[in-house]
Image (spheres, rainbow, N blue to C red):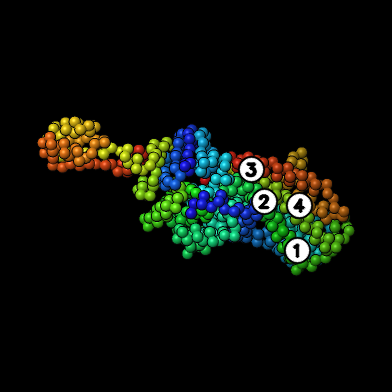
Amino acid sequence: MPASDAPGLPVAPSAGRAWFRFLGSELRLMLSRRRNQAGLGVLAALPVIMAVAVKIASPSAGSGEGPSFLSQIVGNGFFVALTALGVEVGLFLPLAIAMLAGDALAGEAQIGTLRGLLVAPVGRTRLLVTKYVGLVLGGLIGTLVVAVAGLLAGAALFGLHPVVTISGTTLSLGEGLLRLLLVVLYVAAFLAALAAIGLFISTLTDQPLGATVALALLSTTMWILDAIPQLDWLHPWLLVDRQVAFADLLRDPVYWADMRLGLLTDLAYVVVFGLAAWARFANKDITG
Amino acid sequence: MTPALTTSGLTKRFGPQTVVDSIDLDVPAGSVYGFLGPNGSGKTTTIRMVLGLVRPDAGSVSLLGRPMPADLLSVLPKVGALVEGPGFHPYLSGRANLQRLDAADRHADPRTARRRTDAALDRVGLLHAAGKRYRAYSLGMRQRLAIAAALLVPRDMLVLDEPTNGLDPQGTREVRSLIASLGADGVTVLVSSHLLAEVEQICTHLGVMRTGRLVAQGAIASLRESQQASVLVVTPDGALAASTLAGLGLGEVSVSDEGAVGLLGAVAPESVVAALVHAGVAVREFVVRRPRLEDLFIELTGEGFDAGE
């Protein structure tokens, strides 16, 4: 039956529902992919390995190694989650975002699903926004998995106790978990900024692996540059510069200044690269 | 009635190469339009421009009476499309792939999604393999899944780019009868192919591309008529036969080894025979040759490996 037999288009679901339906489809696509499930497994494995290693290596390890949380793990499993986030934010989590960003547009272009979506039709702006929200949620899920795996491993091997802050005060476990949630959100915001760069790179190519490698290299380079003191004039411009500031959430009271700068940097990167991705994708010839 | 699709001066250049050169398509509503041309003649790029995937360098597209790509979001829900072969997620099942496309369409009703995807799968004979991963599909099944994607919701128009690519003869026949039945339902179908034989039987209209140009277009009947039938008279009296033919007004009359030949034009064959007999020509054979569409196609697009040059 031709569509014109029906009065106009079929009764369209509300715009909001349609939007969430497509976002849901995007998340299912991301989470149902075996490779991504394995990636989450790797992210979750690291805190477990760390906790086990600390347990085996130094059953009576002392403290006094400065702000690193590693030394505090023995006394409180809570710190497994924090330590793991601190370690994974440098490479594992950016790598995860790089893989998802490579899939987002370059991957769809490579296997030919992009043209199918665009003639379905999905507006290009809507597709880009949905892809970006998918990446942000993917980053949040990854970060949560690290935190939860860390808490579980820590609880199993060392137990969870009230949290001694860097300032020396003690927070109840509930308050500590709340601070951990803020840490997760702070890291996820960094990943969201990284995802904007990744999405932009993903609009430039039909090779998902190329996009993934490019973002992973870019992220790693920024971490390296940030570690070279002679380049301190450059550091404020680097996305990664304030990312370890999440430790400030474990001060009492919380020291916000650096994190505020970190979030502003995140926002600037999201705006710049988000717009660049849009400018590129909105007019791109889809020939793949 | 508004044409389903028209383009005017549609042009696309990739670098120095003009891939589509100022073409004026005219696809009447309700027609089954065969879009023919050798590989590389610009058919797919034209289709991409029609669907808003590629931006024209010049010219305009009107699809279902609306300008493209300006009205893309309101027009494309009424157009089912298969562009340049199937493209699906290999690790999702056929059904899950269709549901993803359905989720992408703002106008599709999620409550009927399962029923509609299964109906589309059934229509292309894939329902039994709906739960199988796309990775495990044969080439023919992949092609059919792509056609099913175009049938997810009722459409006013279908744009099918090489839908029989990779299908075996049986599959080709099935796709042909599917297109014919859709055409019978009143859906306008634009079907591209590099083989005339694949679409000739089901098309009402043809457009022929060569090296980026539209070299012929029209209703199939009028294209056939545009080809002049010729007559051959086998006789020992060649000269007499030739002058008789010329006297009747036949064109390009000449004497040949066997007798005489000429272009029939508007003259009725029976009156030619009567005149020949009347003039005393000893007619051994009288043959009216109507060129096949295939001959026209080959004449227009060239033959052999130089076809795309």
Residue type pointed to by label 1: Leu
Q: Position of residue A110 (x, y in %)?
A: 54, 49
Residue B266 occupies which quadrant of the picture?
A: top left
Chain bearing mark 4:
A
Chain bearing mark 1:
A
Residue type pointed to by label 3: Ala
Determine the secondary structure under disc 2. Answer: helix
N-terminal of the pair, mark 2 or mark 3, is: 2
Q: Horizontally, is A178 left or right of B172 in the view? A: right
Chain bearing mark 3:
A
The circle on residue A277 is 3
Chain bearing mark 2:
A
N-terminal of the pair, mark 3 or mark 4, is: 4
Q: Position of residue B55 (x, y in %)?
A: 54, 38
Say whether mark 4 and mark 3 are on the same chain. Answer: yes
Determine the secondary structure under disc 1. Answer: helix
Q: Residues within 10 Å of mark 4 (few under 14, many from 20)?
A: many
Could you tell me if residue B189 is visible in this image?
Answer: yes
Q: Horizontally, is B89 left or right of A125 in the view? A: left
The circle on residue A133 is 2
Q: Residue at x 74, y 56 (%)?
A: A85
Q: Which residue is mark 4?
A: A186
The circle on residue A151 is 1
Determine the secondary structure under disc 3. Answer: helix
Q: CA distance from mark 3 to mark 4?
A: 23 Å
Q: CA distance from mark 2 to mark 4?
A: 16 Å
- Is residue A174 or residue A124 the one in the foreground? A124
Residue A173 occupies which quadrant of the picture?
A: bottom right
The mark total stands at 4
Q: Residue at x 75, y 49 (%)?
A: A243
Residue type pointed to by label 2: Val
